[in-house]
């Protein structure tokens, strides 16, 4: 029997950071978010992004990496600013525990929809995850003029901006994953790579079986894999938290 349910969650520790990251990535930037899942029900998140200093200065956001690092630190990540002669960016990480995440009430940000289907068999349950992330819908919901200006950019301007942006979502599982729509696979199918777009709707699909009577740690894999999509969704599509002087 197949059961469908909408999963409305977000990663609380990244709250308020997504707009800062969006602006950073629209400044001729590159980076990636990499979630590595372990069999003991834990995972490690590694996030990095950088942009040209000239572009940050041009948009009046020279201190953007520091703002983003502070925001991530406030939400539980180890974050720092990294600078070279021509670029400035951030690097952040966090060790995640499945049990803690399961007990946190949360919701998905604007522009992100997620559905989980469970197909229960005698020996295993097959999970099928679908995530759609619409950057235009997310930007249009932001407070102030910044989001609306970005959301209403001409299509050509968005395409030119996207050509300068290189951001990937990587998901490494303890078991090979065969059914998915990832752009690349590595490590014999254990690592999936999606190229994230800030112009078009991002569509992610992933299907995998979880044995009913094997290592108890496998039970943690579905929720952690869901978190992988939530992480990148939150980074790009979370509403900007209003700062008070």
Image (tube, helix red, strand yellow):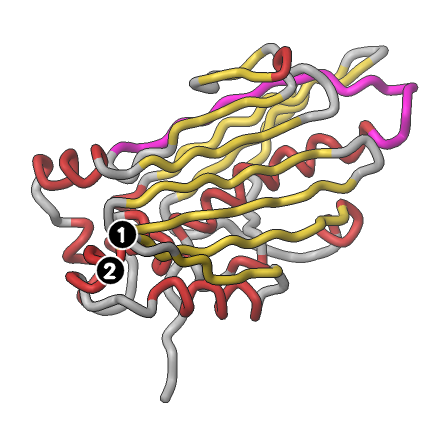
Q: Nearer the viewer, residue 53 or 123?
A: 53
Residue 180 vertical position relative to residue 114 in the rendered view, above or below: above
**Residue 190 sits inside the magenta stretch:** no
In the rendered image, the quadrant that contains the C terminus is bottom left
Give residue 65's quadrant in the image: bottom left
Mark 2, residues whose alpha carbon is within 10 Å: few (<14), some, or many (≥20)?
many
State which region is magenta. Answer: 200-217
> Residue placed at 47% from the left, 32% from the top?
131
Is residue 158 found left or right of 35 in the rendered image?
A: left
Mark 1, residues whose alpha carbon is within 10 Å: few (<14), some, or many (≥20)?
many
Is residue 6 found left or right of 125 in the rendered image?
A: left
**Residue 206 sits inside the magenta stretch:** yes
Residue 125 vertical position relative to residue 80 in the rendered view, above or below: above
Task: Give the total of numbered labels.
Answer: 2
Q: Which mark is residue 72?
A: none
Residue 130: horizontal and vertical position, in percent? 50, 27
Residue 137 vertical position relative to residue 244 in the rendered view, above or below: above
> Residue placed at 56% from the left, 37% from the top?
34
Residue that label 1 marks: 52
Is residue 228 found left or right of 194 in the rendered image?
A: right
SS at mark 2? helix
> Residue placed at 48% from the left, 47% from the top?
48
Residue 20: horizontal and vertical position, in percent? 36, 60
Q: Which mark is residue 56?
A: 2
> Residue placed at 76% from the left, 48% from the top?
97
Q: Nearer the viewer, residue 245 or 24?
A: 24
Residue 187: horizontal and vertical position, in percent? 63, 16
Residue 33: horizontal and vertical position, in percent? 51, 41
Q: Are marks 2 and 1 in contact (CB under 8 Å)?
A: yes
């Amino acid at each position: 029997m197949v059961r469908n349910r909408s999963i409305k969650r977000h990663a609380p520790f990244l709250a308020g950071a997504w707009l800062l990251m969006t602006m950073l990535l629209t400044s001729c930037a590159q980076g990636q978010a990499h979630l590595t899942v372990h069999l003991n029900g834990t995972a490690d998140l590694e996030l990095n992004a950088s942009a040209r200093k000239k572009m940050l200065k041009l948009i009046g956001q020279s201190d953007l990496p520091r703002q983003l690092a502070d925001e991530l630190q406030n939400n539980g990540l180890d974050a720092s600013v990294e600078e070279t002669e021509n670029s400035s960016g951030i690097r952040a990480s966090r060790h995640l525990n499945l049990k803690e995440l399961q007990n946190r009430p949360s919701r998905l940000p604007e522009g992100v929809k997620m559905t989980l289907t469970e197909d229960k068999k005698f020996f295993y349950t097959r999970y099928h995850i679908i995530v759609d992330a619409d950057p235009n819908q997310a930007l249009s919901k932001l407070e102030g003029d910044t989001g609306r200006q970005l959301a209403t950019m001409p299509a050509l301007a968005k395409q030119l901006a996207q050509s300068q942006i290189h951001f990937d979502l990587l998901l490494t599982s303890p078991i090979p994953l065969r059914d998915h729509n990832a752009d690349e696979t590595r490590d014999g199918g254990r690592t999936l790579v999606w190229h994230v777009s800030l112009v078009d709707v991002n569509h992610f699909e992933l299907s995998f079986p979880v044995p009913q009577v094997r290592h108890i740690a496998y039970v943690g894999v579905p929720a952690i894999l869901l978190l992988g999509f939530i992480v990148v969704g939150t980074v790009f599509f979370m509403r900007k938290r209003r700062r008070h002087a």
